Amino acid sequence: MKPITIDNLDFLKGAGLIPVVVQDSHTKEVLTLAYANRESLQLTMDTCLAHFYRRSHQKVMMKGVTSGNVQLVMGILADCDANAVVHLVEPSGPACHKGDVSCFHYRLINQK
C-alpha cells in the first residue's frame, strides 16, 4: 500500500471538502458518509477521533460531541485520485443520527 500525506489530497475538487466513507474496522460495514476539510482531517489524524466538517453547522465537529457516539479511527485510506478517504473506525455507538448502527438501511427499488 502506497503512503501519501494530507498535502497530496485534492480538497479543491470538492470546494475544500472531500467525502469520507466511514467503515467499521472489524465488520467492514459502511456506517456513514461524511465530509472533511483539511482542518477536520488533521484533527482526526492528531487525535485518532473522527472529526468532520458539518455542512449543516458550517463548522468542524468531532463525531459524538453531542451523542457520545465517538469513532476511534484505526486507519485512513485514500482513493486512487486522492479526492476521497475511508475512515476505518471502532464505533462506540450508532453512527446514524437516527439511532441506527449504519445510515445505510434503505433499499432503493426501481418503480417502473
Image (cartoon, rainbow, N blue to C red):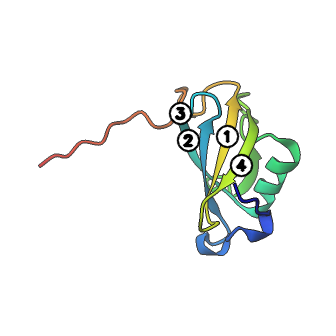
In the rendered image, the residue lying farthest to the right is 46
Indicate which label's residue lies in the foreground, 2 or 3.
3
Badge 3: how crowded within 10 Å, few (<14), some, or many (20+)?
some
Q: Quadrant of residue 78?
A: bottom right
How far apart are the alpha carbons under marks 1 and 2? 11 Å
| SS label for mark 2 | strand
Of residues 63 and 22, the one nearer the viewer is: 22
Residue 65 against residue 58 in the figure, above or below:
above
At label 4, which amino acid type do we have? Answer: Ile
Contact between labelled residues 1 and 4, with CB atoms less than 8 Å apart: yes
State the mark number for residue 32. Answer: 2
Image point 45% across, 37% down: which residue?
A: 104
Residue that label 4 marks? 76
At label 1, which amino acid type do we have? Answer: Leu
| SS label for mark 4 | strand
Image point 82% across, 49% down: which residue?
A: 45
Of the image marks 1 and 2, the number of the one nearer the N terminus:
2
